[in-house]
Image (cartoon, rainbow, N blue to C red):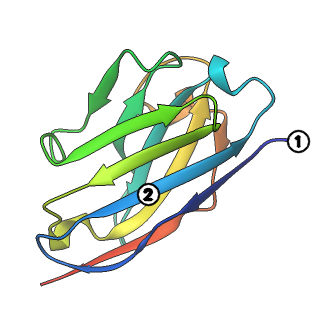
Amino acid sequence: QVSLVESGGGLVQAGGSLRLSCAASIRTFSDYNMGWFRQAPGKEREFVAAISWRGDTTYYADSVKGRFTISRSNARKTVYLQMSSLKPEDTALYYCAAGRVFGFEALQYNYWGQGTQVTVSS
């Protein structure tokens, strides 16, 4: 019924850039707030960025402010995460999520993608 599929992950050198995409199979995609989370080995899943259903409000974790940009296309039913100035500590499995309420808590989100791996080498 509902699925989120991420793409764009891969291996990149420190200082490089990647753009992640999340294609959503949701009938009323424009009704959902979208977020990105990440989880590194041995670490808790952490919030990265969120965007409201209209795209007029965004919020970022302090660790990625100024480097990452979240955006969305409701026409394409896709959310993006543009990542620049990547650091080795950005290495993680990145998850796309959808929820009815804008927020940065995992519990606010109802649907999750399978994750896409981002590895930043030094």
Pointer 2 residue: 20
The C terminus - image quarter: bottom left
Give 98 or 29, whichever is nearer the viewer.
29
Element marked by disc 1: loop
Mark with earlier residue (2, 1): 1
Disc 1: CA contacts within 10 A as few (<14), some (14-19) or many (>=20) = few
Image point (35%, 71%), residue name: 42
Check disc 2 and give the amino acid type. Answer: Leu
Check disc 1 and give the amino acid type. Answer: Gln
Image coordinates of residue 121 in percent, x first then y, are 20, 84
The N terminus - image quarter: top right
Q: Is 83 left, or right, of 50 in this rendering?
A: left
Image coordinates of residue 5 in percent, x first then y, are 65, 56
Q: Is residue 98 positioned above or below 67 on the image?
A: above
How many marks are shown on the rendered structure? Answer: 2
Q: Which mark is residue 38?
A: none
Q: Is residue 12 positioned above or below 69 on the image?
A: below
Element marked by disc 2: strand
Mark 2–mark 1 contact, CB under 8 Å? Answer: no
Pointer 1 residue: 1
